[in-house]
Image (cartoon, helix red, strand yellow):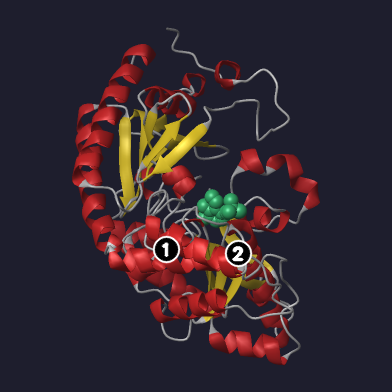
Amino acid sequence: MSPRHSPADIAERTAVKKSNLFYQSRARRPEVERAEGIYIHGKNGERYIDGSSGAMVSNIGHSNPNVLKAMKAQMDSATFAYRLHFENAPAENLATEIANRMPEGLNKVFFVSGGSEAVESCVKFARQWAVAAGQDKRWKVISRFPSYHGSTLGALALTGYGPLKDAFAPLFKDMPKIPAPTCYQDQDNLSDEQRGLKYAEMLRDEIIAQGPETVLAFAMEPVGGASTGALVAPDSYYTRVREICDEFGVLLIMDEVMSGVGRTGTFMASEHWNVRPDLVAVSKGFAAGYAPLGAMIADENMVETVLDAGGFAHGHTYAGNPLACSAGLAVLAEIDRLDLMANTRAMGDLLMTGLNDLKDRYAFIGDVRGKGLLTAFEMVSDCETMAPLPKDLNAYDRFVEICYERKLITYSRRTHGGIDGDHFLVCPPMIVTETQVNDILNILDDSLGVFARESGL
Ligand code: PLP
């Protein structure tokens, strides 16, 4: 087999002849028949391990009977009641359940239907709060490069990921970016702590360069996702970022769309560093694939200020949908009942150990990183310099395909523009068992061997 696998080759192999449906390209996949636990079954009887929980969504696994039961009960009661006409108990109760799990005062919940909507809500809310608080010069939201904060036009301005934003540049006002703390690529002799501080100081420098009185917020993923491959900064980064935001009155927005609701082994990933943000965006694992659901979680004093000043001029039709909220409530109950955050920490450790063993055996694995079950590994051509693999190997597409052939689903991205790297997210549902983690590692091992042979690595 040729080691060259262009995106066009792969699209050709996976294309169907005719369809009225389209996504990003012509590439199509087998049709799903049913999904259960960590497995997805295709129409032809084949069974796949959902090694990435879809796009890090199906956190409690598929077809959880208690979630389905709660949703069915809600369906018999009301599937939609418009928020301007009626209150609904699932939305009210879910807001309370979230507030009970968040740090003191971070207890006001604004529901949306997805991650991009949650991020946009944070930005728009922050702006309205600043105006209401007499700081109307503040409008810039600094974020990081690379990063991913969503694909709607407002969220795209924060996103630092070229392939999904470059084509649209005139349509939105891009926001200032600082480098994400990709310390594993650095060729200096700094300690971890010094590296964390080095990257945090870039925020301070950028705030000063932009004019502190114009900077509204800093938005970051506490553990990175699609565009960075589970990037985790040294501990010192997080506390210093909070200090810097406080120094200049800049709001800290944590985008926990992927990392939140238990995925890293704590309810919010920012808890690992004891950092209290001002605004938080969640989605994905929130209703864990059972319904489209997201939320902005906001500081109560800020919410009072905005409501006193006339209200939040923002909202979506499906906000607080009772069916979606009943799913969210049942997901939280299952996370508690099955102690899934403890399982996430234990299985995350096992997975990380296994991935590090693979790193020791395959010279082209340059880094293994993550927290809990938000884990990834990165392929490189030189582990010393962390130089990326040649682009024409298309490792990020090809390796996923090799795993797919072996019935394991992983999630990959090649980061573009400035920072290159073929990274692969290995993020099974939080219900994964020790045996299943070992199954995943065995398939990865086999697939790495195939990839190494055909690519001449
Ligand atoms: N923020 C982060 C950190 C994400 O990982 C994503 C999606 O991958 C989003 C925002 C956007 O979420 P959605 O695709 O639901 O709009």
**Left or right: 456 in relation to 359:** right
**Left or right: 439 in relation to 214:** left
Secondary element under disc 2, as helix, strand or loop, is helix
Ligand 1 within 8 A of label 2's CB? yes
Per the image, the residue denoted by label 1 is: 331
Quarter of image, res 436: top left
What x and y, as percent, mark residue 329? 46, 69
Front-most of residues 456 and 59: 59
Secondary element under disc 1, as helix, strand or loop, is helix
Amino acid type, callout 1? Val
* Residue lying farthest to the right in this orientation: 170
Amino acid type, callout 2? Ala
Residue at 76% across, 76% down: 313
Residue at 73% across, 78% down: 84
What x and y, as percent, mark residue 435? 19, 41
The tag on residue 118 is 2
Quarter of image, res 198: bottom left
**Left or right: 68 in relation to 168:** left
Q: Is residue 434 visible?
A: yes
Q: Is residue 330 above or below residue 243?
A: above
Badge 2: residue crowd in 10 Å (few <14, some 14–19, many ≥20): many
Q: Is residue 310 above or below residue 346?
A: below
User: Which callout, 2 or 1, points at the residue further toward the start of the chain?
Assistant: 2
Residue at 30% across, 42% down: 368
* Residue lying farthest to the bottom in this orientation: 308
Residue at 31% across, 32% down: 365
Badge 1: residue crowd in 10 Å (few <14, some 14–19, many ≥20): many
Q: Is residue 412 visible?
A: no
Between tags 2 and 1, which lies in front? 1
Q: Is residue 112 above or below residue 138?
A: above
Q: CA distance from mark 2 to mark 1?
A: 19 Å
